[in-house]
Image (cartoon, grey):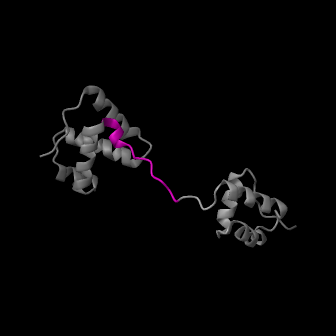
Amino acid sequence: MKYVKPLLQTEMTTLKEMYKNAPVHRMRQRAHIILMSNSMMKIKSIALSVGLDRDTVSSTIDAWESIGIRGLYDDKRSGRPPIYNEKDREIITSKVKKEPRQLKACIPEIESATGKSASVDTIKRVIKKGGLRWKRIKKK
């Protein structure tokens, strides 16, 4: 049987507040797991009531025991690395400034200058990060 060590009153208060008010569902769920483990519920019954695997519940308890409240937060995750570096972004910005009304016409020039291909949406994101705005022109 694996349970958390008996919680202090301040930890109980913090976990109850986290269970009620945490902005992320997973944090609320983890706080609830610790509270249930503190009330001597078995891992299997916690897993059934929360709807998670028993290994997930066990690892949550381990994280609480090893690093405390920080163990209930999600770690930073890396995303996909950007296609274009700073130099490429400057090239894209200059090409779009030359022909701002025809973004699709700029794409072959951008591909030949940078040697990388990307979608129109990616080019739009690069332009927006560069401080420019891209809008379609309304025909009246």
- Which residue appears at 66% of the width and 65% of the height? 121
The reply, left or right, for residue 95 in relation to residue 120 is right
- Which residue appears at 69% of the width and 56% of the height? 87
- Which residue appears at 27% of the width and 53% of the height? 56
Question: What secondary structure do most residues of the magenta stretch adopt?
Answer: loop
x, y percent for residue 125:
66, 58
x, y percent for residue 113:
73, 67
- Which residue appears at 24% of the width and 44% of the height? 62
Q: Nearer the viewer, residue 32 or 93?
A: 93
Name above or below for residue 19 compared with residue 125: above
Q: Which residues are magenta?
A: 68-80
Outermost top residue: 9
Q: Nearer the viewer, residue 4 or 95?
A: 95
Q: Nearer the viewer, residue 137 or 59?
A: 59
Q: Quadrant of residue 33?
A: top left
The reply, left or right, for residue 60 in relation to residue 122 is left
x, y percent for residue 55:
23, 55
Q: Quadrant of residue 103?
A: bottom right
x, y percent for residue 123:
68, 63
Residue 79 magenta: yes
Residue 38 magenta: no
On the rendered image, what quadrant is the C terminus found in?
bottom right
The reply, left or right, for residue 103 in relation to residue 8 is right
Q: Quadrant of residue 119?
A: bottom right
Name above or below for residue 4 compared with residue 128: above
